[in-house]
Image (tube, helix red, strand yellow):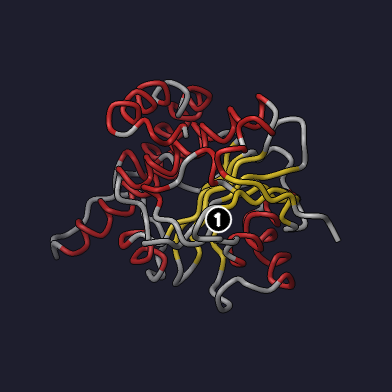
């Protein structure tokens, strides 16, 4: 059994490496941005980030709103879900088991993945309940055309035995629709993963709005779909990285307390 290091939140910065602290700041910013862009579900859902050079992850404490997440109240766990560092305050929040089960499975199976975001947004849940899944209705959606994984609902993911099926469904994909559940995005870092989730969420919103209008839908030809994907694939390595500095500036203006 791994020993848990418990310390006051105020002591975290002085007792972790510079690399870990930088990761904490980046992840806290991502939580605040998810709140800013309406991709939250009260205290539920989770975002994890691997600490470079280690097999350790940072995850939110189960009880905080995303708008309350800051660098010092993130919990550090290992790939087996053991808590390694638990910052203490008056609340004493722990890790959401579903978050531990889902995220450790992905980080362990996909060494290329540094960050994982899972959501239960209204639009994401709506599309997850559609047999068609995500449709190629918009330029935004075309980024994910043919590249979206699907995982059938098999009860809340709280058992370790559910990890294998989840990983099998995800495969090598960057995003996944969890049927009758929500959305999931993975990426090498926070910037890329936030970008993927933001675009996926926007594609789901547009699909729900278009279908709700009752009007006949226009779907691009397969030729156009393939050409658009080729254009986007050629630029894929810039997605997220270009926007991230501007997004960080936005967080700084709104509430620089995420760095605490």
Front residue of 54/166: it is: 54
Q: Residue at x 63, y 55 (%)?
A: 103
Answer yes or no: is residue 149 visible: yes
List x then y, in percent, for residue 89: 53, 53
Closer-to-camera residue (63/99): 63
- Vertical placement of 247 versus 87: above or below? above
Task: Judge whether residue 175 can be spotted in this image.
Answer: no
- Helix, strand or loop at label 1? It is strand
Does 159 sit above or below residue 209? below
132 to the left or right of 97: left
Residue at position x 36%, y 28% from top?
Answer: 247
Name the residue located 18 percent from the left edge and 64 percent from the top edge.
212
Quick one: 163 or 61, which is closer to the camera?
61
User: Which residue does the numbered mark 1 point to in the structure image?
Assistant: 149
Q: What is the residue that sits farthest to the right in this orientation? A: 1
**215 to 11, vertically: above or below:** below
Q: Residue at x 50, y 27 (%)?
A: 236
* Quadrant housing the N terminus: bottom right
Numbered disc total: 1
Q: Residue 255, how many percent across, how many down?
A: 32, 34
Q: Position of residue 242 (x, y in %)?
A: 42, 20
Q: Crowdedness of circle 1 by 10 Å Cα count: few (<14), some, many (20+)?
A: some
């Amino acid at each position: 059994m791994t020993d848990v290091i418990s310390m006051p939140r105020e002591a975290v910065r002085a007792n972790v490496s510079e690399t870990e602290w930088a990761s904490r700041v980046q992840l806290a910013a991502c939580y605040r941005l998810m709140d800013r862009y309406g991709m939250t579900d009260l205290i539920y859902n989770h975002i994890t980030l691997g600490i470079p050079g280690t097999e350790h992850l940072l995850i939110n404490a189960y009880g905080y709103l995303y708008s309350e997440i800051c660098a010092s109240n993130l919990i550090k766990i290992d790939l087996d879900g053991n808590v390694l560092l638990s910052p203490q305050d008056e609340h004493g929040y722990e890790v959401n088991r579903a978050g531990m089960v889902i995220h450790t499975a992905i980080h362990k199976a996909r060494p290329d993945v540094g960050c994982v975001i899972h959501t239960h947004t209204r639009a994401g849940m709506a599309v997850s309940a559609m047999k068609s899944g995500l449709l190629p209705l918009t330029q935004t959606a075309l980024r994910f055309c043919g590249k979206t994984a699907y995982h059938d609902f098999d009860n809340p993911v709280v058992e370790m035995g559910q990890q294998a099926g989840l990983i099998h469904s995800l495969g090598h994909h960057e995003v996944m629709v969890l049927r009758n559940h929500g959305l999931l995005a993975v990426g090498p870092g926070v910037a890329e993963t936030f970008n993927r989730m933001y675009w996926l969420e926007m594609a789901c919103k547009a699909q729900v709005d278009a279908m709700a209008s009752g009007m006949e839908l226009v779907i691009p030809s397969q030729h156009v779909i393939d050409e658009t994907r080729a254009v986007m694939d050629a630029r894929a390595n810039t997605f997220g990285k270009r926007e991230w500095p501007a997004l960080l500036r936005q967080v700084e203006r709104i509430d620089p307390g995420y760095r605490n």
